[in-house]
């Protein structure tokens, strides 16, 4: 009985020592896993920052290109509108000049003379443009 108790006590002590060693190994393994996880997290974070910075630069470049295109299109549209307005003004000017000439020459010249004068005057006005 004493022998059995002694064996049980020795077995208990051995089990306790093994449990302490296992606990120590588990703690070391836990620390190694945490260290590796921390290293991987830093790597992922660095890669994410690099990717985000690249995306930011790409987005900014795309925005610059779009802004440049909008400005270019607006300038072209303004130029087209300017040309259209210029043509309208020229037409109004020509019509007005024709009416003025017609009123001025109404009583001074014959119909044929007026036609020749009108034709020459209109041609001169067109050449000025």
Image: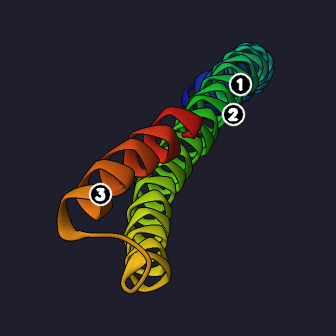
Q: Going 20% across and 69% down the picture, which residue do you hit? A: 111
Q: Residue 115 falls in which quadrant of the image?
A: bottom left
Let me know if residue 83 appears in the view: yes
Q: What residue did someone put label 3 on?
A: 113
How far apart are the alpha carbons under marks 2 and 3?
A: 69 Å
The quarter of the picture where residue 60 lies is: top right
Foreground tag (2 vs 3):
3
- Cα separation, mark 3 vs mark 1, equals 74 Å
Foreground disc of the pair 3, 1: 3
In the image, residue 122 sits, relative to residue 104, either above or below, namely above
Label 2 crowd (10 A; few <14 / some 14-19 / many >=20): few
Left or right: 115 in relation to 128: left
Q: Nearer the viewer, residue 7 or 88?
A: 88
CA separation in Å, label 2 and label 1: 5 Å
At 46% from the left and 72% from the top, the residue drawn is 101
Asked if disc 2 and disc 1 are in contact, CB closer than 8 Å, the reply is yes
Q: In the rendering, at what x and y percent does residue 2 appear?
A: 65, 32
What residue would you read off at disc 2? Answer: 60
| Residue beneath the point at 80% across and 17% down | 35
The residue that label 1 is drawn on is 57
- Label 3: state its secondary structure: helix
Decide which of 63, 56 is in the foreground and name it: 63
Closest to the observer, 28 or 79: 79
- Rendered location of residue 30, percent (x, y): 71, 25
Going 75% across and 26% down the picture, which residue do you hit?
49
> If you read the primary sequence from the N terminus, does the residue marked by circle 3 or circle 1 appear first?
1
If the image is split into quadrants, where does the C terminus sit? top right
Q: Position of residue 92 (x, y in %)?
A: 42, 72
């Amino acid at each position: 009985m004493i022998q059995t108790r002694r064996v049980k006590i020795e077995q208990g002590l051995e089990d306790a020592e093994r449990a302490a060693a296992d606990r120590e190994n588990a703690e070391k393994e836990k620390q190694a896993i945490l260290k590796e996880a921390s290293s991987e997290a830093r790597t992922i974070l660095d890669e994410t920052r690099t990717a985000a910075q690249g995306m930011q630069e790409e987005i900014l470049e795309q925005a610059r290109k779009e802004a440049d295109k909008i400005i270019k299109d607006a300038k072209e549209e303004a130029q087209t509108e300017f040309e259209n307005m210029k043509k309208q003004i020229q037409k109004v000017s020509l019509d007005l000049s024709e009416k003025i000439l017609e009123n001025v020459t109404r009583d001074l010249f014959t119909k044929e003379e007026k036609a020749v004068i009108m034709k020459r005057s209109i041609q001169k006005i067109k050449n000025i443009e």
